[in-house]
Image (tube, rainbow, N blue to C red):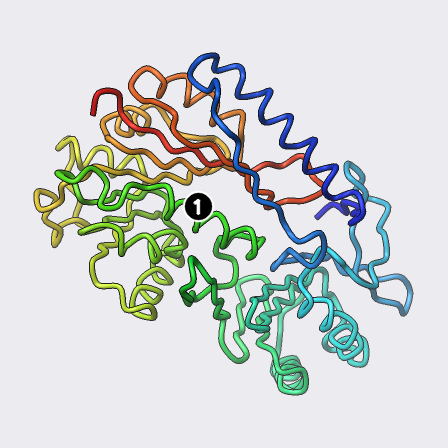
Amino acid sequence: MALEPIEPQQYQALLDAKSEQIRRRFDELGSFASGLVLDVFSSKPENYRMRAEFRMWHEGDDLFYAMFPPGNKYQPIRIESFPQASEPINDLMIPLLAGIKASPVLSKKLFQIDFLSSQRGEVLVSLLYHKQLGDDWLALADALRIELGINIIGRARKQKHVLGIGYIMETLEVRGRKYHYQQVENAFTQPNAGVNEKMISWACENVERFGPMDKPDLLELYCGNGNFTVPLAAQFRKVMATEIAKSSVNSAHVNLIENGIDNVTIVRLSSEEMTQALAGVRAFRRLADVDLSSFNFGTILVDPPRAGLDQETLALVQQFDQVVYISCNPDTLLENLQELKQTHVLKRLALFDQFPYTHHTECGVVLHKRNS
């Protein structure tokens, strides 16, 4: 993880510059985006990251958290605190390090520490080693876990030891309601919880309730742990949500139960597989108990990886009356919009500053099919 310096007093100016850059980029779409207002959603200028990863640097008898300047993996910078990270992570860093340094068993061959935190104050710590972890490590790590009131996972080659539980619970407030989510170690979750709340709220506010009234169901691709699924479910008759990562699918099922949602079907399929299933090209055992004909989809939500939508999925998306597209890469979003503008009208455009002080930009668009 590279160290990106932050200057809270410069945050607004940097966000304004990022916003202007996005406006200029969307001008490339010509009349398709002309006159559209860019909704800009800011982050907290500090303590906004709910995850953090640090290399552990051994220097003689010393051990410290280390990060590196961008593009340089050989000059570690000692980290005493990390203002980008949440308050629970910062509060834990020093006492955790002290407890590890006090024990040669815990400190030897430790090469990385990952933190996952929630707005509820829960923290899960993963300790990564270049050695096998024995009973002595288990006893000492569990004592440290109890002392600090956290959960710890120890990882080494072909080993994983969970001390406590292997996840945290997060609570997100969306349009006045609180939603609860299981977040599992090593599974994708949005890193900036405050901006994530704004992003989900924007999606809920900008989908037409029940979508087109004669097509009341939602298809969601890349649903993760149900981040958007759970709050959006109330706005549709039925929802089908797909995700390929098994751990995220498991968490999505937990999160539906946790929030009392009963109109969502989660299936473990990739976007390409879902496209094939809907086209009747291929049958999937994972859909054996799902009656696809019972769904009447009018809205699709996609939150793809940086590569954007492949051509088959893009063709599927073009069939929907309403499209909500969340993107972590404006370049591939713009490429996809060059195709989508042939069939759809751009209705809303938003910037979500998930990653302050960096060039990374999260965008959202809502599109309606022409003449629908």
Q: Which residue is painted at 54% across and 67% down in the image? A: 159
Horizontal side of residue 7 vs 332, given as left or right? right
Front residue (pair 174, 248): 174
Across and down, in percent, residue 323 comes to 32, 33
Which residue is located at x 37 percent, y 48 percent? 204
Image point 26% across, 64% down: which residue? Answer: 261
The correct choice, above or below, for 358 with respect to 55 in the image is above
Image position of 132 (left or right of 297): right
- Please report the residue visible at 32 percent of the width from the left and 52 percent of the height from the top: 232
How many badges with numbers are in the image?
1
Q: Where is residue 107 drawn, in percent x and y? A: 76, 72
Residue 133 image offset from top left, x and y in percent: 62, 73
Depth order, front residue of 23/245 = 23
Q: Residue 92 lies in what quarter of the image?
A: bottom right
Residue 136 drawn above or below residue 326 = below
Q: Quadrant of the C terminus?
A: top left
Amino acid identity at mark 1: Trp
Residue indicated by mark 1: 202
Q: Residue 351's x, y, as percent?
A: 54, 37
